[in-house]
């Protein structure tokens, strides 16, 4: 694009062509608008503005990116004393009498799009994407986005007095969605998509023709009717349930209508500052950094190249196998599925077809794409048909003997380089690897149900898993658009191991006097989408029963309530009864007096006098159980980092993201407070409570799990 050679240390480069000043962001890898870049940009804008020989100004990016937005590291520390920021650069564009054109090639996200919105014209290459994703970090667009985007879209889409455009703007910002250049042109965000030729050359031409024309969004009139704003507030979650930023964002949009432009901007800036300091934003930023760390694995050289997975196979066409096959299809990887049961094959085929059909109906997928995905999943009859795949995932019954037979057969049938993976929830990967002649190529790939929806993937490292296999598995996780978390090969890995302790405590609380309904409500109020008993009914009490039969026996008493339910054939939703009762066709759990009787009998049998249990005790005991096991797993090296544990529980089990995951939440409560409580529980409640050494160590020095400093902001 820009012909001027760019020295790597430069954050911004500029040149003049035919009286048009071109200012390019040149801050790799994504032209982040850090304090330093914004300052350099401001300097160039002011210089061009003050130069009478310059007719108009083009702002562009470099190397296929316009700008990925603000530098998140800047949110973690107070800005340097006299520093300028993106708002100053955008204000300089706004103030200038010259015409500005944004030439976009690649992503213009967050602050990047806000900069472009301050310009008079925006043009882009077809592969460009625009978006204001700040909400995903618990923030709002703080560089004028909440003021300019609704103004622009309400004017470009004037149906219903501009309400159509306002709705589009709110929708885009509240979902943090990225739009393709074509979509953005259709909405009115872009003036032109440059289908062929150089977007910069076209921008220079446009700047020459339009020089002197002002087309500022700030000058557009804008009215957001209060009922529309009230309606928007009603659509997002409550402030204390992850909707904090969403409500502030809607408030900022309301300010765009109620106040003068400059006042609206100031209001937006104030709301932004409040959000940066808020707990949900801090939690979201913690998760953002934790996710970036996932790929860093001690002992694995970053120079090792992953082996591509171009062809895959799945053994087992049940719930998980079919879901996993769709994950591959979604990523454009053809996948073959094998099952011993013809009925299951038919059910699997139908499930795949129905899932994609439903997505077409909801407008989430084009009919062509859906058909391509259906075609990518083929059902085959024997192992010879999958001999040439690069990777196979076994998802047969959770039974070691069956899994070993499958691994032996796969080892014989598949080409020697192929990776053999297991989707087991709990079983020993090493035992499976031992029946093959390629233990180095064996790894656990533990998906979560429904596999095509849930974002988590635990990558389980067996003792023989080779660095090459692990590197390829972690790269595959990314390609499948999953958050791949490395786990050691311990019973239940990270997530389920913690789940067992959480469920143990929930069951003990029931024996002591709480009801399943009370516990589920308390956990939902904490922010989980469902409580442990509704979850047990959903996954199947029979499934947990079978797992408990294979699990190593703990050195303390376990609750018998689930076993009693299992023996009564109360498997959960699938039988209409479990911990709760379900009316036919309903997934709504209702309390069942029969279960209350069973629970009372269990308490009596154990000699427990039932007592009133507070919701606070429910939360403390269930969450401290998670934190303690999390600390144990980190201390034992099964989980690499506290952030990994947080990712597992937020993306695999619905721990509320705005509390940052169990370990980050624990830092907020205080490791000493949690440790002291556990020591007390051990005395009062029994040996199931044994403080993890890492928790003890942190408590003694009042330390925290999170490696990242708490965010402080003083602007
Ligand atoms: P499922 O019962 O729905 O499906 C298992 C399938 O394997 C059946 O279709 C069965 O016919 C087939 N099968 C059995 N033996 C076979 C063999 N020798 N060769 C080929 N096919 C065979 O079970 P699921 O819920 O899909 O679970 C599968 C695996 O995934 C288990 O290891 C389970 O622990 C794990 N898992 C399950 C969940 C979940 O929530 N269901 C979540 C994560 C992991």
Image (cartoon, grey):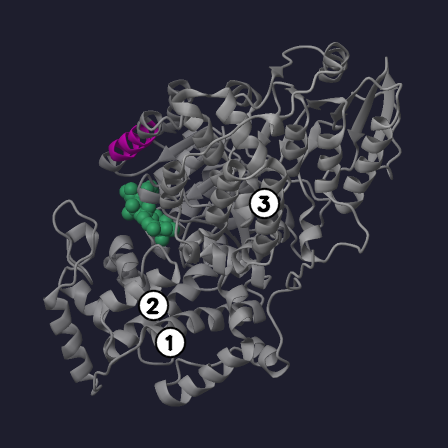
Identify the residue position indicated by label 3 in the image.
268
Tell which tag, 3 or 2, sits nearer the viewer: 3
Provide the secondary structure element on which disc 1 rests. loop
Provide the secondary structure element on which disc 2 rests. helix
Q: Does residue 131 appear anywhere in the picture?
A: no
- Look at the picture and state if 117 lies above or below 576: above
For the residue pair 401 and 309, the one nearer the viewer reads as 309
Q: Specify the quadrant of the image occupied by residue 400.
A: bottom left
Q: Position of residue 639 (x, y in %)?
A: 55, 62
What's the CA distance linking mark 3 and mark 2?
A: 44 Å
| First-in-chain label (3 vs 1) | 3
For the residue pair 300 and 281, the one nearer the viewer reads as 281
Is 71 on the left-hand or right-hand side of 347?
right
Residue 204 lies in the magenta stretch: no
Find out whether the residues at labels 1 and 2 contact each other: C-beta distance under 8 Å. Answer: no
Q: Residue at x 51, y 26 (%)?
A: 153
The circle drawn on residue 503 is: 2
Provide the secondary structure element on which disc 3 rests. helix
How crowded is the residue under tag 2: few (<14 C-alpha within 10 Å), some, or many (20+)? some
Q: Specify the quadrant of the image occupied by residue 634.
A: bottom right
* Number of numbered tags placed on the structure image: 3
Which span is picked out in magenta? 345-356
User: Is the shortest distance between ligand 1 and the CB of mark 1 under 8 Å?
Assistant: no
Find out whether the residues at labels 3 and 1 contact each other: C-beta distance under 8 Å. Answer: no
For the residue pair 500 and 207, the one nearer the viewer reads as 207
Q: Does residue 130 appear anywhere in the picture?
A: yes
Q: Residue at x 22, y 86 (%)?
A: 608
Q: Position of residue 617 (x, y in %)?
A: 35, 76
Q: Residue at x 75, y 26 (%)?
A: 59
Identify the residue position indicated by label 1 in the image.
554
Is 489 on the left-hand or right-hand side of 705?
left
């Amino acid at each position: 694009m820009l012909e001027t050679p760019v020295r790597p240390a430069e954050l911004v480069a500029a040149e003049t062509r035919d009286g048009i000043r071109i200012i390019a962001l040149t801050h790799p890898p994504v032209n982040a608008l850090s304090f330093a870049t914004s300052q350099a940009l401001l300097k160039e804008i002011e210089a061009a503005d003050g130069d009478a020989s310059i007719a108009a100004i083009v702002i562009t990016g470099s190397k296929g990116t316009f700008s990925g937005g603000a530098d998140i590291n800047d949110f973690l520390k107070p800005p340097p004393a006299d520093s300028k920021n993106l708002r100053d650069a955008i204000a300089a564009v706004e103030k200038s009498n010259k015409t500005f054109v944004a030439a976009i090639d690649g992503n213009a996200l967050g602050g990047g799009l806000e900069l472009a919105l301050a310009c008079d014209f925006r043009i882009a290459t077809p592969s460009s994407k625009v978006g204001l994703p700040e909400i995903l970090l618990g923030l709002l667009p703080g560089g004028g986005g909440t003021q300019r985007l609704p103004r622009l879209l309400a004017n470009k889409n004037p149906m219903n007095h501009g309400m159509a455009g306002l709705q589009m703007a709110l929708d885009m910002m509240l979902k943090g969605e990225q739009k393709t250049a074509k979509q953005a042109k259709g909405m009115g965000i872009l003036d032109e998509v440059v289908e062929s030729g150089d977007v910069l050359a076209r921008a220079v031409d446009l700047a020459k023709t339009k020089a002197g024309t002002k087309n500022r969004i700030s000058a557009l009139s804008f009215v957001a009717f209060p009922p529309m704003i009230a309606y928007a507030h009603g659509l997002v979650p409550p402030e204390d349930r992850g909707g904090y930023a969403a409500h502030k964002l809607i408030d900022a949009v309301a300010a765009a209508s109620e106040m003068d432009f400059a006042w609206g901007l100031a209001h937006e800036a104030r709301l932004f500052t409040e959000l940066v300091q808020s707990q949900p934003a801090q939690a979201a930023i913690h998760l953002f950094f934790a996710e970036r760390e996932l790929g860093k694995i001690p002992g694995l050289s970053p120079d090792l190249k992953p082996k591509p997975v171009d062809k895959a196979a799945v053994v087992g066409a049940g719930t998980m196998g079919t879901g996993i096959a769709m994950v591959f299809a979604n990523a454009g990887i053809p996948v073959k599925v094998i099952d011993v049961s013809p009925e299951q094959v038919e059910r699997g085929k139908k499930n795949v077809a129905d899932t994609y059909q439903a997505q077409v109906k909801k407008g989430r997928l084009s009919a062509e794409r859906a058909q391509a995905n259906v075609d990518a999943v083929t059902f085959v009859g024997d192992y010879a048909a999958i001999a040439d795949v690069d990777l196979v995932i076994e998802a047969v019954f959770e039974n070691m003997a069956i899994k070993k037979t499958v691994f032996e057969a796969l080892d014989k049938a598949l080409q020697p380089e192929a990776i053999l993976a297991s989707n087991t929830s709990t079983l020993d990967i090493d035992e499976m690897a031992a029946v093959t002649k390629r233990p180095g190529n064996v790894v656990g790939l533990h998906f979560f149900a429904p596999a095509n929806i849930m974002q988590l993937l635990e990558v389980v490292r067996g003792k023989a898993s080779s660095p090459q296999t692990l590197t390829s598995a972690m790269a595959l996780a990314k390609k499948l658009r999953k958050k791949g978390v490395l786990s050691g090969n311990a019973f239940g890995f990270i997530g389920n191991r913690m789940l067992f302790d959480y469920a143990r405590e929930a069951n003990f609380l029931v024996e002591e006097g709480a009801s399943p309904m009370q516990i589920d409500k308390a956990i939902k109020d904490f922010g989980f989408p469902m409580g442990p008993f509704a979850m047990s009914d959903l996954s199947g009490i029979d499934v947990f029963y079978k797992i408990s039969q294979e699990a190593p026996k703990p050195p303390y008493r376990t609750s018998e309530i689930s076993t009693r339910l299992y023996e009564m054939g109360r498997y959960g939703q699938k039988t209409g009864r479990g911990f709760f009762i379900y009316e036919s066709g309903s997934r709504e759990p209702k309390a069942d007096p029969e279960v209350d009787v069973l629970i009372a009998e269990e308490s009596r049998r154990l000699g427990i006098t039932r007592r009133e249990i507070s919701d606070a005790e429910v939360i403390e005991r269930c969450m401290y159980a998670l934190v303690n096991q999390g600390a144990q797993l980190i201390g034992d090296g099964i989980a690499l980092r506290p952030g990994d544990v947080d990712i597992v529980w937020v993306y695999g089990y619905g721990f509320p993201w705005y509390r940052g995951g169990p370990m980050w939440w624990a830092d907020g409560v205080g490791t000493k407070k949690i440790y002291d409580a556990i020591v007390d529980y051990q005395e009062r409640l029994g040996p199931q409570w044994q403080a993890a050494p890492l928790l003890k160590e942190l408590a003694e020095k009042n330390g925290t799990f999170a490696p990242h400093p708490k965010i402080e902001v003083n602007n």
